[in-house]
Amino acid sequence: MKLFDDPETNRRFHRTQWRMLFATMIGYTLFYFMRKNFRTAASQRRCSATSSSPAASSTASRSS
């Protein structure tokens, strides 16, 4: 398909269009496979931050 009169511009446009399509596909694939890892890491970080805070330990010692 010819979008531009200049053949060089037309060639560069189509090449860039394919690059963007592949970059989007790779980015989404990485997001899809890594999203559960991020969710797990975030929840573990949240749990470890609350259990190691001084306020949590003093509350736990008072309830015992």
Image (tube, rainbow, N blue to C red):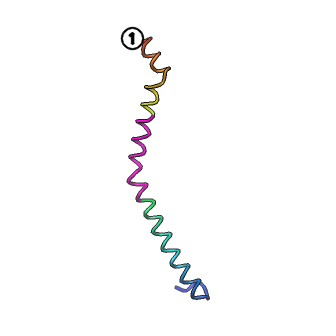
Most foreground residue, 52 or 62: 52
For the point 44% across and 11% down, the residue is 62
Q: Please determine whether, in this image, residue 27 is positioned above or below residue 22.
A: above
Is 15 covered by the magenta stretch?
no
Q: Quadrant of residue 41?
A: top left
Mark 1: few/some/many CA within 10 Å (<14, 14-19, 20+): few
For the point 48% across and 69% down, the residue is 21
State the extent of the magenta-drawn residues as a range: 29-45
Q: Please determine whether, in this image, residue 61 is positioned above or below residue 53.
A: above
Q: Main secondary structure of the magenta part?
A: helix
Q: Residue furthest right?
A: 5
Most foreground residue, 4 or 57: 57
For the point 41% across and 49% down, the residue is 35
Q: Quadrant of residue 63?
A: top left
**Image spot of residue 40 (x, y percent):** 39, 41
**Image spot of residue 39 (x, y percent):** 42, 43
Pointer 1 residue: 64
- Please state the total of marks drawn on the protein image: 1
**Image spot of residue 9 (x, y percent):** 59, 83
Q: Please determine whether, in this image, residue 19 is positioned above or below residue 49.
A: below
- Indicate the amino acid at tag 1: Ser
Q: Quadrant of the C terminus?
A: top left
**Image spot of residue 61 (x, y percent):** 42, 13
